[in-house]
Amino acid sequence: MPPRTAAARTSVGGPLPSGALTGADERRLPRTLHPLAWWIWALALATAVSRTNNPLLLFLVLAVLGYVIGMRRTEAPWARGFKYYLYLALSVVAIRVVFRAIFASGVTPHDHFLFSLPHIPTPDWYAGIQLGGPVSLEALLSAAVDGLRLACMLCCVGAANTLANPKRALRILPGALYELGVAVTVSISVAPQLVQSVQRVHRARRLRAGRTKGLRALRGIVVPVLEDALERSLRLAAAMDSRGYGRAGRATKTSRRLTGALMLLGMCGLCAGAYGLLDASTPKFLGLPALAVGALLCVAGLRLGGRRITRTAYRPDPWRFEEWAVAACGVLSATLLFTNVGFDAAELNPSIYPLSWPTLPLVPTAAILLAGAAGFLAPPPLPVKRPEKAAK
């Protein structure tokens, strides 16, 4: 038997359409990457972004996100929402600049004056904050760069939501968070199902020559949509009850109390450890030791709480070389930016006072480009199966 070629391989949903894959992608079978790999990559890249305030590096991060999303985005509904994260990112930058202009701190003789806003006098107990007044170019640029860093973090989270299947990501939650995962899955499915119901009712009214505009049409659409949503909710409740959702299992009252205590103490430890890392004046045991103890307590609580949940996975997502490669790209990028090896830490946070053009350090640039390697290391997405046109 002759060996199978890439064109003869089949994916979920049928044979691959001709011309769907080109170049190196033809040597790999299209599949869905494990969602945890995309989340590790995105969160690691967001961690690297928190390290720098260099606008050139931040724009490079946005370019890397756009490249990876363009290469590995699917045609699923959740994969079309990255543009809304971009709108949110632009809003964050604009709000940060506007607030910096309103709550101006004055202009020094070395600053570049731009304009002046009407000054509003404040009471004595409100000292230290000035409303209005002169605004300098340095102040607006500083606010824009701070907003750009937060915008890049939001875009990293948006990239994870765009590339990873949210329903598949919720399947890997620990057993103790099973109820939370089901609730989030149901909430994610509500909006698309409502849109489909509205479109279905609207098409039915058009076929019956009914009114399609105005308040009367709205009343004729809302009632069937609500009825359909109620029927769907009842079917979902019956299906969840038949599958044993909500049963306590073998958990006793003592084990549930112990699980809650471990989780509460673990969260307190995580909060204390994070505060200790941010504040250098705190005792040393409030830093990494408290963070490590809190993490261990949370893991113990999740393990203990997960024993009462028995779950089976149908066709679990594999973790292969591509998952390791994508996750390693993000982790290595964050590690290189935190180690300060081969570059000066001041290059990550260039000063705006005095105003000067930022430099592009070589090692951080290579680290961010390394994160972009996930665009071709990840397997190609599954092609969309389109109905074949009937022969004329």
Image (spheres, rainbow, N blue to C red):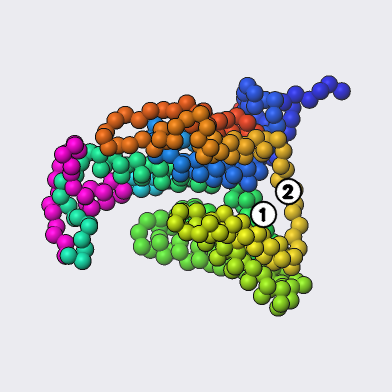
Q: Residues within 10 Å of mark 2 (few under 14, many from 20)?
A: few
Is 307 left, or right, of 227 in this rendering?
right
Foreground of the two, 343 or 208: 343
What is the CA distance from the residue labelled 2 to the residue labelled 1?
A: 9 Å
User: Left of 238 or right of it: where is 108?
Assistant: left
Q: Secondary structure at mark 1?
A: helix
Is 120 placed above or below 352 here? below
Q: Which residue is mark 2?
A: 316
- Number of other residues with Cα within 10 Å of mark 1, as a class: few under 14, some 14 to 19, many 20 or more: some
> What segment carries the magenta color?
94-123
Instruction: Kindly indicate the quadrant of the structure image that contains residue 353.
Output: top left
Quick check: is 284 in the magenta stretch?
A: no
Residue drawn at (71%, 77%) of the image = 254
- Please identify the quarter of the rendering in which residue 34 is found: top right
As shown in the figure, which amino acid type bears the numbered disc 1? Arg
* Residue name at image x 17 percent, y 65 percent: 124
Where disc 2 sits, the SS reads loop
The residue that disc 1 covers is 171
